Image (cartoon, helix red, strand yellow):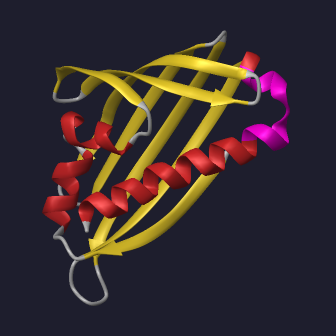
Amino acid sequence: MHYEGAFDVAGSKEKVYEFVNDPKKVTTIFPDVQSVRVIDEDNFQLKAKVGMSFIKGTMDVKLTIVEKKKPTFSKLKARGTGLNSVVDLESSFTLEDGPNGGTHVKWAADAKISGMMASVGSRLIDSQADKYVKQIIGSLEKKLS
């Protein structure tokens, strides 16, 4: 599944870059996070409640910032396990000067889901994943505004 979009914020590229590369800050944009453990500046873990249809519970997610080009680009990989499922996610943020000052944030995310969560059917997964991505990006946009 592939998702992408863009939004503008008043903050500088440096401010946005620092936010998306700070494990303690970026994990605040994910819904239903129960705990966060920072291993180092590029590796961290979180536990979050997730659910769709009859599948509900918690997932353990390991995240790694795999590419940084200060202050214009960042790429993050995540792997969530739990509920007899695996979710692999790769997301990136490209930061450009905004048309009226501030920063134009382009984002992209690719997700692969396997296991029990994949068994509920592609329509339901696409709908839930789209909702989840919109929540995360909406939260990011709000925190950067």
Q: Position of residue 28 (x, y in %)?
A: 30, 41
Q: Main secondary structure of the magenta part?
A: helix
Q: Position of residue 102 (x, y in %)?
A: 22, 78
Q: Residue furthest top?
A: 84
Q: Quadrant of the C terminus?
A: bottom left
Above/below status of 14 relative to 74: below
Q: Position of residue 137 (x, y in %)?
A: 44, 55
Q: Residue at x 61, y 50 (%)?
A: 131
Can you tell which quarter of the image residue 3 is in?
A: bottom right
Can you tell which quarter of the image residue 142 is in?
A: bottom left
Q: Residue at x 44, y 33 (%)?
A: 32
Relative side of 1 to 67, left or right = right
Relative side of 81 to 11, left or right = right
Magenta-drawn segment: 117-125
Q: Position of residue 128 (x, y in %)?
A: 68, 42
Total marks in image? 0
Can you tell which quarter of the image residue 36 is in?
A: top left
Residue 123 lies in the magenta stretch: yes
Q: Residue at x 74, y 44 (%)?
A: 126
Q: Nearer the viewer, residue 57 or 5?
A: 57
Above/below status of 139 relative to 39: below
Residue 75 lies in the magenta stretch: no
Q: Nearer the viewer, residue 21 or 139?
A: 139
Above/below status of 64 relative to 135: above
Q: Quadrant of the N terminus?
A: top right
